[in-house]
């Protein structure tokens, strides 16, 4: 039966005088029409009724909210509702599924709580204070065509587990924030506009989330969107492994990208426009997560996008333009992945990443910046693939302060300084093209940057500059049309160049300065305006299988006291093949000269070589006061000096090895290896092939048996023999090599390996790379990466793996390639009691203590009875025993109660002699 209609019309016969009376008398499903007028009462609805305003109907709260809905499907149409005060609720929706159509709420807020699921369509909220709409509990609110204006405070606030869906809404002029989401709340905004807010247009924190589609956020007094403290379902930004396995072996982590934002956590913006904000367009911090898809962020006073404090962001087809700061800022271990996005016309950098940030850019454009287009510092890591970087007055890409850059298939142009600059950072560039810059690539770092398959064209100055004391690897790099030198190697640099070409430089093709020691193989230098190869005074280098053609000056110039080795090189298309200073040393082997009227290089080879027999390479000098035409006297003197220096270094290393306590078997092994390596070096110098010998070693022994010390000495021996360029020791363990995420391990292993190039990589407790019973552990990836790197750099590094004897066999059996490269094991025996006593006595001598004979005997007995379990550290335990003895000695002397003056005049033995009483209790330190 259809419910009877009710009518509210004060003074009319048969009508209700108040809305409340009509509601109480209405049956479920009734329609109540309300005559125009002002009604001062507080209406409570808990049933399915419809209230329809006829004309302008104002409902003014008498006490509490003007309208309260507790249950049912109540519906209001065309009402104006007012609260008792602007900070109070005008409408309170606690339950049911109420519908408000074309209603105006003035001078109070709308509050939705509990389990209410209201629909408001065509409504407006004005002149509220604190918040215009307040959503809490598990409520579900749908807002269509909502207008919020003239409110002092926030526009919409949602907390707890509340949900809100806004469509075609306008939030205008809130003095606080436009939308505020806290706790586990979530809001979906579609085709909404938030303008003129005094702070952020959208603010979300905790585990709150939001989805914005085709929204406009502008004219804000703060950020466009500010996210704080959100995370993925596991409490951290959601990450995913890299789908590009071709990046394995780079210096840069390929890892961990916030590719997706799961569930309702995080904020998504699709097709949105954010502009004219007083702060950043989008700010994500505190572990929050944000996704921007096809968004346009422009004319912001702060950064267009700022990601910091472990926040994560994914940007797809984003345009960040015309901001008064940097377009994209990533700091504080923030993580950003950007695809097909544009960062342009920024008043600072296009990308600024510092403080452990991780950034991945794919198919992006960075252009028209006031500072460097990409700036990395403070340990930041960036992967840049298929990107275009253009028109920066400073650098295209700048890497500083331990930062790391991996760039693949990128275009860099129009940089006022250098296209790529690496200063105290690391970089690997593959397949990149650099043009129209002042310098192409500038490197000055303690790391060893890599350039592979890159093209550098039309630079105003140098194509590639390798700075002072910098090592670099160049593979198939082509430099064309440089304004000065194509490749410049500054003082003390140690570059390795494989293949590639330098074409049409306006200066010399390759310039080598004093102390630089490059190794260049298979490189072509064509049509140089000056020399093909210019080695300055004091420069060095080895140049093999190179082709110097068409230079206007002599193909090769060697300055005073330079040392140049040319092996199997070809010179043609020039008038003169070699010009050298009288003090220069030029070694020539199997070089060929064509089209030169008076070639010099072929005449330098000894008779044996000309007749096809093997000979030690000839070294040629110009005639000078030191000798005759062949300069043999000066060469012999300098070569003899070098040999004497190497012999002195070897002798010093032998002395240092002999000083080590115990380790007799290890010492013999090291000396035998040294002799074997010495023969390898002699054969190489004679032009003979080296025997098939692996220099990599396994050190099997318990902790504290001197493995690290011997590894350092072994590197020194190989460096003294000229088989390693530096001989330095780089120590690593599982924590340095193995990453925390899928794809994180190979780059970490590669970065450590590259630091060891020219020296020894010592991996302690190496068996931990393959923990027993963990078949899917990331350590296996570290092992595979090591095997490949050892093959790629077999002559540039020695790897020593060390650990407990029983565990090292398991490591070698885990990978066939590993076993084939570690064919020799040195076994470090535990120290005997007598050897431990010698270590303590050595420590005492070094620190000006004496060990009395009775103390020596007591020490021997102490070590005999000392438990040798897991806590026993061999030499380390002996050193700790000495430290404890000095502490007990100091305590013993202090207990004598002597004054400082008495101690100063006391018997020296009192201050220096260690007695049996100074021994610690008999347990392992």
Image: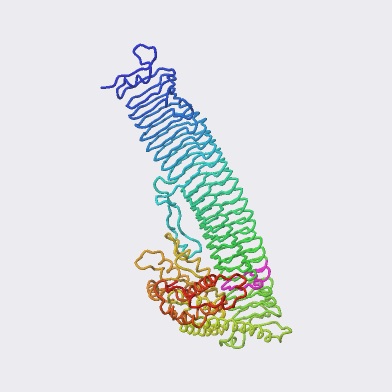
Residue 395 higher or lower than 717, as above or below: above
Whether the magenta-drawn stretch holds residue 174 is answered as no
- The residue at the point 37 percent across, 12 percent down is 12
Examine the rendering and report whether any part of residue 378 can be seen: yes
- The residue at the point 45 percent across, 56 percent down is 256
Whether the magenta-drawn stretch holds residue 525 is answered as yes
> Position of 469 compared to 123: left or right?
right
Comparing 563 with 306, the one in front is 306
Question: Is the stretch drawn in magenta largely helix, strand or loop?
Answer: loop
> Position of 226 compared to 580: left or right?
left
| Residue stretch rendered in magenta on the structure | 507-533
Examine the rendering and report whether any part of residue 291 can be seen: no
- Taking the view exactly as shown, the residue that stands out farthest to the left is 1
* x then y, percent, for residue 426: 55, 63
> Position of 312 compared to 74: left or right?
right
Quadrant of the rendered structure where residue 871 is? bottom left
- The residue at the point 53 percent across, 34 percent down is 175
């Amino acid at each position: 039966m259809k419910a009877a209609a009710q009518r509210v019309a004060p003074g009319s016969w048969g009508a209700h005088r108040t809305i409340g009376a009509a509601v109480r008398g209405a049956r479920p499903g009734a329609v109540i029409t309300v005559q125009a007028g002002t009604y001062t009462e507080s209406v409570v609805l808990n049933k399915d009724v419809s209230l329809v305003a006829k004309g302008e109907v104002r409902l003014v709260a008498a006490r509490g909210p003007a309208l309260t809905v507790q249950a049912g499907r109540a519906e209001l149409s065309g009402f104006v509702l007012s609260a008792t005060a602007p900070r109070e609720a005008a409408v309170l929706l606690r339950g049911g599924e109420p519908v408000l159509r074309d209603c105006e709420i003035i001078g109070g807020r709308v509050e939705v709580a509990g389990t209410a699921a209201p629909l408001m369509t065509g409504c407006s909220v004005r002149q509220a204070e604190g918040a215009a709409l307040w959503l809490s509990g598990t409520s579900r609110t749908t807002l269509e065509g909502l207008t919020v204006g003239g409110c002092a405070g926030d526009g919409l606030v949602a907390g707890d587990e509340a949900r809100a869906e806004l469509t075609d809404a306008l939030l205008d002029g809130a003095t606080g924030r436009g939308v505020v989401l806290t706790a586990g709340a979530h809001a979906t905004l579609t085709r909404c506009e938030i303008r003129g807010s005094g702070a952020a247009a959208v603010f979300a924190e905790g585990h709150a989330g939001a989805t914005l589609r085709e929204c406009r956020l502008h004219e804000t007094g703060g950020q466009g969107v500010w996210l704080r403290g959100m995370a993925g379902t596991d409490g951290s930004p959601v990450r995913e492994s890299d789908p590009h396995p071709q990046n394995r072996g780079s210096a840069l982590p390929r890892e961990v990208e916030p590719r997706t934002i799961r569930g309702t956590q995080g904020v998504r913006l699709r097709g949105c426009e954010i502009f004219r904000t007083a702060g950043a367009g989008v700010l994500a911090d505190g572990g929050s997560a944000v996704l921007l898809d096809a968004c346009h962020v422009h004319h912001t006073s702060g950064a267009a996008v700022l990601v910091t404090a472990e926040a994560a962001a994914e940007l797809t087809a984003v345009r960040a333009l015309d901001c008064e700061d940097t377009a994209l800022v990533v700091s504080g271990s923030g993580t950003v992945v950007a695809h097909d996005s544009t960062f342009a016309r920024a008043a600072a950098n296009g990308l600024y990443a510092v403080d452990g940030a991780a950034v991945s850019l794919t198919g992006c454009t960075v252009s028209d910046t006031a500072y460097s287009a990409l700036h990395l510092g403070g340990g930041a890591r960036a992967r840049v693939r298929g990107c275009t970087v253009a028109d920066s007055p400073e650098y295209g890409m700048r890497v500083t302060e331990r930062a790391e850059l991996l760039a693949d298939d990128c275009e860099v142009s129009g940089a006022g300084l250098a296209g790529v600059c690496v200063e105290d950072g690391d970089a690997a560039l593959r397949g990149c093209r650099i043009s129209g810059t002042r310098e192409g690539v500038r490197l000055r770092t303690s790391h060893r940057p890599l350039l592979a398959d890159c093209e550098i064209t039309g630079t105003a100055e140098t194509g590639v500059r390798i700075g002072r004391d910098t090592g670099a690897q160049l593979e198939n790099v082509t430099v064309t049309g440089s304004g000065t030198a194509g490749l410049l190697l500054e003082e003390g640099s140690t570059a390795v160049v494989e293949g590639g070409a330098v074409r049409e430089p306006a200066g010399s093709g390759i310039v080598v300065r004093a102390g630089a020691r490059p190794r260049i193989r298979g490189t072509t230098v064509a049509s140089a305006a000056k020399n093909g190869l210019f080695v300055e005074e004091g420069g060095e280098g080895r140049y093999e299988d190179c082709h110097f053609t068409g230079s206007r000056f002599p193909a090769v110039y060697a300055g005073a006291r330079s040392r140049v080795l040319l092996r199997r090189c070809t010179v043609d298309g020039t008038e003169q093949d070699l010009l050298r200073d009288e003090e220069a040393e030029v070694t020539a082997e199997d070089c060929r000269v064509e089209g030169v009227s008076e070639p010099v290089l072929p005449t330098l080879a000894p008779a044996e070589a000309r007749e096809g027999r093997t000979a030690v390479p000839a070294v040629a000098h110009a005639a000078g006061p030191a000798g005759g035409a062949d300069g043999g006297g000066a060469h012999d003197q300098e070569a003899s000096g070098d040999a004497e220096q190497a012999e002195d270094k070897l002798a010093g290393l032998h002395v240092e090895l002999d000083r080590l306590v115990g380790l007799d078997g290890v010492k013999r092994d090291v000396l035998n290896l040294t002799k074997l390596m010495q023969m390898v070096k002699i054969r190489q110098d004679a032009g003979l092939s080296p025997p098939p010998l692996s220099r990599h070693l396994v050190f099997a022994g318990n902790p504290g048996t001197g493995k690290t010390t011997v590894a350092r000495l072994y590197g020194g021996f190989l460096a003294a023999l000229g088989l390693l360029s530096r001989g330095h020791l780089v120590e690593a363990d599982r924590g340095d090599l193995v990453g925390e995420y899928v794809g994180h391990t190979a780059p970490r292993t590669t970065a450590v390996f590259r630091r060891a190039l020219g020296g020894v990589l010592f991996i302690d407790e190496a068996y931990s790379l393959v923990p027993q019973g963990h078949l899917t552990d990331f350590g296996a990836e570290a092992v595979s990466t090591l095997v490949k790197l050892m093959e790629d750099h077999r002559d540039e590094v020695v790897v020593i793996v060390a650990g407990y004897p029983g565990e090292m066999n398991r490591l070698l059996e885990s990978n066939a390639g590993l076993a084939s490269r570690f064919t020799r094991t040195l076994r470090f025996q535990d120290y005997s009691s007598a050897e431990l006593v010698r270590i303590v006595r050595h420590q005492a001598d070094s620190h000006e203590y004496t060990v009395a004979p009775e103390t020596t005997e007591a020490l021997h007995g102490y070590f005999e009875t000392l438990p040798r379990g897991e806590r026993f550290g061999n030499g380390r335990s002996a050193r700790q025993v000495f430290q404890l003895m000095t502490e007990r000695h100091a305590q013993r002397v202090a207990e004598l109660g002597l004054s400082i003056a008495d101690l100063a005049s006391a018997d020296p033995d009192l201050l220096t002699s260690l007695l049996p009483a100074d021994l610690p209790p008999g347990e392992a330190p």
